Amino acid sequence: MTYCYYRGMLLIGLEKLPEALESFNLVMQSPALTAHKVQIVTLKKVILLELILNQKINQVKNSSLKSLNYMIQQKIQSACGVYFQLASLLEDEKTEKAFEFYAQ
């Protein structure tokens, strides 16, 4: 799991964002019984990459979280709630409100 995370981080540094997103999705699809800190940090990066590449996070909601069990999904979503809120503001083209929200 950490190998794919660090691979994604290196790919971001090399500006290969689609490949980095694939690596991060592998982290999110790893089987687990509990929510790992790596998965939480990875989901935050996946949300930001999705916004940069696609201007929306539909793929995150559909693919990355489906492979996890319900309890882990809830834990991860609550830890990344601010990122989901920021993404929803940016998707609705309320960029001024998004920047105000982020500045808080």
Image (tube, helix red, strand yellow):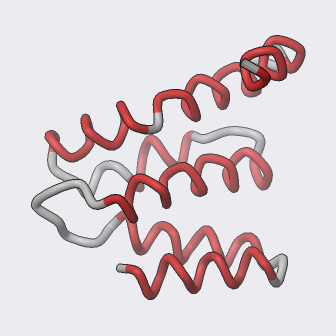
Residue 101 position (above or below residue 17): above
Q: How many marks?
A: 0
Residue 18 located left or right of residue 84: right
The picture quadrant where one finds residue 3 is bottom left
Residue 66 position (above or below residue 32): above
The picture quadrant where one finds residue 87 is top right
Q: Percent from the top left, x then y, of residue 99?
A: 83, 22
Q: Percent from the top left, x then y, of residue 13?
A: 79, 79
Residue 68 located left or right of residue 94: left
Identified at 78% across, 55% down, the residue is: 53
Q: Quadrant of the C terminus?
A: top right
Identified at 47% across, 29% down, the residue is: 81
Q: Nearer the viewer, residue 81 or 58?
A: 81
Identified at 71% across, 82% down, the residue is: 11
Q: Residue furthest left?
A: 33
Q: Quadrant of the N terminus?
A: bottom left
Residue 23 position (above or below residue 68): below
Q: Residue furthest front?
A: 104
The picture quadrant where one finds residue 100 is top right
Residue 47 located left or right of residue 67: right
Identified at 66% across, 27% down, the residue is: 86
Q: Percent from the top left, x then y, of residue 72?
A: 21, 46
Q: Percent from the top left, x then y, of residue 32?
A: 17, 66
